[in-house]
Amino acid sequence: MRKALQGLAAGLCLLLPGYFGSRFTGGILSPVPILPFIFGDFLQQFRYWIDVDKILVIFPMLLFFVWNPGLLRGHLKIPRRTYLLVAAVIVLSVVDFVGSWSYGVKYQGLGYTCVVDAINLGWIAILCFLSFSNWKGEPSFLTNLAVHWIFFAWVAWYAFPWLGEPI
């Protein structure tokens, strides 16, 4: 029961990264990550029936619960699909860093681009460390929970930041 409550609390805490990721300010606290941007753009066609801003805030939490419902049952082991997803998003993120670097320097400036990319590399380093320690070591519920929480927080808040011409 305690692990289920920890999983539920962690999922609810994803409302904070969801909030910052959905603000689209283009600053250090909200570098316009691609997932809420694209999802928000898609949802605009339904804006008369739903509140798009609220959906964007809860979206990472919903993904967290749908992707690994085992966290609510106290599963210790990280699912193989999570390793594949994390690896794919990290590779795509590095490709994005390389491809958008010059645009970021040109439009947002060297300082902003370096800070945003450094923060992204920090998220990636933490994810790699936790994933590798759980993969090679003894499975742990808290590591499983942390990997999923950090991954969905990163994707909602900071992954694939907009670097280029202002939107």
Image (spheres, helix red, strand yellow):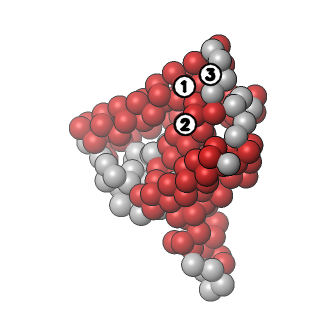
- Amino acid type, callout 1: Leu
Residue 160's disc is none
Q: Mark 1 vs mark 2: which is more N-terminal?
A: 1
Compared with 53, 135 (above or below) is above
Q: Residue furthest front?
A: 1
Instruction: Return the residue at label 2.
Output: 146
- Amino acid type, callout 2: Ala
Where residue 135 sits in the image (x, y, percent)? 66, 19
Residue 130's disc is 1
Instruction: Return the residue at label 3.
Output: 134
In depth, the one of 115 and 98 nearer the eye is 115
Q: Mark 3 vs mark 2: which is more N-terminal?
A: 3
Residue ID at (64%, 66%): 42
Callouts 3 and 1 close, C-beta under 8 Å: yes
Q: Secondary structure at mark 2?
A: helix
Residue ID at (55%, 58%): 12
Residue ID at (50%, 43%): 154
In which quadrant of the rendered view does residue 80 lie? Answer: top right
